[in-house]
Amino acid sequence: VRQVLQGCRRARAPALRVQGQPPPRAPPPAPRPLRGARHHQVLRPHPRRVPGALPRPPQVPPELPQGDLRVGARRAGPSHRRPPHRVRLARARRGRPSQGPGGSCGSCWSFSTSGALEGANYLATGKLEVLSEQQLVDCDHECDPSEPRACDAGCNGGLMTTAFSYLAKAGGLETEKDYPYTGKNSACKFDKSKIAAQVKNFSTVAIDEDQIAANLVKHGPLAIGINAVFMQTYIGGVSCPYICGRHLDHGVLLVGYGSAGYAPLRFKEKPYWIIKNSWGENWGESGYYKICRGPHVKNKCGVDSMVSTVTAIHTSKKE
């Protein structure tokens, strides 16, 4: 699967029309700079392609020892134990919204990227820096080497792995304080002297819940893509729709997992992933989303299809 982030906007509710009134004529299609997607979409699927690109020859991370991380384990698997601190560290930062309802900036990919690097930087340096999404929106125009037309384009979309590649080449990412978020495309104001976090390496993770859980424990929060159709109306609990497409259209941050949470559509408890969204604290469960996982609901809404991990190096910074 090959996808390009494009949009990240929340879908608006369809307009009501009087019974018997003919449906309104659809407007002509708007230009699509990245072979676009529908209004709220952020990713474009391309069959039989592996997502992402690395700053060096493509690689797949080695399989990590799973030990008691097997999802189906009865006693000590991730669905039956409290996640360790490093898996939960992303909760220390309650995200600012990348856009409100119907917002115009499709920057979710930048929030997913910065969130993953924040966690990696914390593990490398012990500092939990709040990093800049706006630097990525303004300055990152990295393209996939294997598909030159698939490029990061600010509010018009981007991809987390190409964003990691940009950061590796540019030198790193500034803090939110030094480069604040505006939610619109602007001229690049990147200052190398203010770099707060640097990318050491990054890679994609196999479509395997055990490996995703193992990488989450070892590397901290993971940048992922998801089909956001059921996120549009999410209020709380564990989202576990019976039918959900795997066309990825939103970039988010996987920060942990839970043992058993009530899934309203299933009328029972299900193990789940914990996802940090970028639509503000008033959305979902204080900005977080839970989606079911496990052997009977694998890759629900494509949540396991595009997972990437990043490691950081220590950045000496003048205090």
Image (cartoon, grey):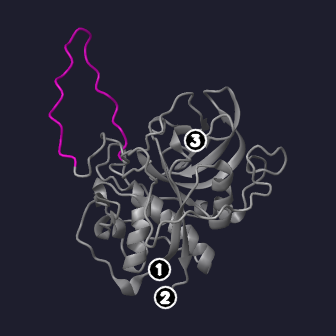
The residue at 30%/39% (across/down) is 38
Badge 1 is on which residue?
Answer: 196
Q: Is 210 on the left-hand or right-hand side of 61?
A: right
Counting residues from the N terminus, which is met first, the one under dot 2 or under dot 1?
A: 1
Query: Image quadrant of residue 90?
Result: bottom right
Disc 2 to disc 1: CB gap under 8 Å: yes
In this rendering, the label closer to the viewer, 2 or 3: 3
Query: Image quadrant of residue 298?
Result: top right
Q: What's the residue type where badge 2 is placed?
A: Lys
Give the spatial CA distance, label 2 vs label 1.
Answer: 7 Å
Is 11 part of what is drawn in magenta?
Answer: yes
The magenta span reads 9-32
Q: Position of residue 107 (x, y in %)?
A: 36, 56
Q: How many marks?
A: 3
> Depth check: 35 or 252 in front?
35
Instruction: Estimate how packed mark 1 is, as few (under 14), some (14 to 19) or many (20 or more) residues with alpha carbons within 10 Å.
Output: many
Give the spatial CA distance, label 2 vs label 3.
Answer: 40 Å
The residue at 45%/68% (across/down) is 54
